[in-house]
């Protein structure tokens, strides 16, 4: 089955149909003190409803005049949800919404010591290929993977190569020349598809937990925050340490 990519920005509702919808982003890019993470959130058939719930929450929070003048809140009003800058009055309600919806999160992570690529861009591309090829194998009986990747510097060139690279990697992994889902990739602004904020928040919790040396102490907030999102983690894979958590092998 042919693989192709789409590079145009979009806005509005999510396409309907029997497709797998992935919302992807990376974390820690260019910051050597943080782990580098590429992640995907897979939404079920109610993806449209989830998007509308997130937009509804956004509209209610924007209307909170008590936060006017707070820079982080003004940034939120302009750009939407972002875990690293949202004030608690925004992040708290968004995390509550995440607890109420069903999603699956898949992440690959590295501390940059055992991964292919001399530059950050090369490492990120390798990680996208790894994650998307595994998801293509997982969903090999589906007709299409619709993938929304949040806009970021340097991603447009990478996205153009992903469909062919992912197909080659998937076939090499299974050792057979078989068909995989058509991979349709769209680069989107954060406010075009607010569902991308889910993976942003998930990766932030994972990053803080990893930087806290994977604490298992309830007194440590990064550990408690990780436990909140862990039930939704289908896979957390480290290039240095292998599988760290999964639905089949959870920490708890």
Image: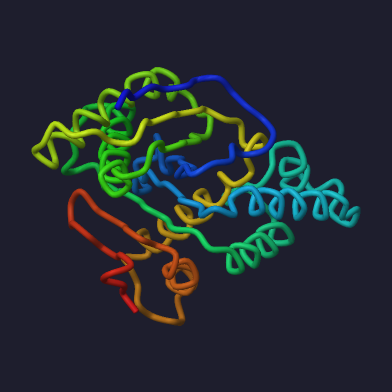
Q: Choose top left, top right, bottom left or bottom right for residue 128.
A: top left
Q: Residue at x 65, y 47 (%)?
A: 81
Relative to the observer, which residue lies in front, 119 or 235? 235
Q: Choose top left, top right, bottom left or bottom right for residue 131.
A: top left
Q: Is residue 8 visible?
A: yes
Left-right relation of 46 to 68? left
The x, y position of residue 58, in whole percent, is 75, 50
Left-right relation of 71 to 67? left
The x, y position of residue 147, in whole percent, is 46, 36
Relative to the observer, which residue lies in front, 86 or 177? 177
The x, y position of residue 135, in whole percent, is 31, 45
Relative to the observer, which residue lies in front, 234 or 92? 234
Left-right relation of 41 to 249? right
Relative to the observer, which residue lies in front, 65 or 245? 245
Q: Residue at x 18, y 43 (%)?
A: 113
Is residue 69 positioned above or below 187 on the image? below
């Amino acid at each position: 089955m042919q693989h192709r990519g789409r590079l145009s920005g979009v806005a509005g509702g999510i396409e309907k149909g029997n497709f797998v919808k992935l919302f992807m982003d990376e974390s820690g890019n260019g910051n050597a003190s943080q782990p580098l993470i590429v992640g995907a959130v897979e939404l079920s058939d109610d993806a449209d409803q989830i998007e509308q719930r997130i937009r509804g929450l956004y509209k209610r929070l924007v209307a909170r005049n008590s936060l006017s003048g707070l820079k982080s809140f003004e940034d939120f009003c302009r750009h939407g949800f972002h875990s690293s800058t949202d004030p608690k009055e925004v992040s708290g309600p968004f995390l509550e919404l995440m607890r109420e919806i069903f999603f699956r999160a898949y992440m690959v992570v590295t501390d940059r010591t055992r991964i292919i690529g001399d530059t950050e861009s090369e490492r990120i591309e390798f990680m996208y290929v790894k994650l998307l090829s595994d998801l293509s194998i997982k969903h090999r009986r589906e007709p299409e993977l619709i993938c929304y990747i949040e806009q970021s510097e340097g991603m447009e060139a990478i996205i153009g190569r992903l469909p062919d690279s992912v197909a080659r990697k998937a076939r090499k992994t299974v050792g057979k020349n078989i068909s995989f889902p058509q991979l349709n990739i769209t680069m989107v602004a954060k406010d075009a598809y607010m569902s991308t904020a889910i993976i942003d928040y998930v990766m932030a919790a994972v990053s803080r937990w990893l930087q806290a040396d994977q604490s298992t102490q309830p007194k440590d907030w990064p550990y408690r925050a990780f436990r909140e999102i862990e039930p939704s983690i289908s896979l957390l894979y480290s290039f240095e340490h292998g599988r760290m958590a999964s639905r089949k092998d959870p920490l708890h």
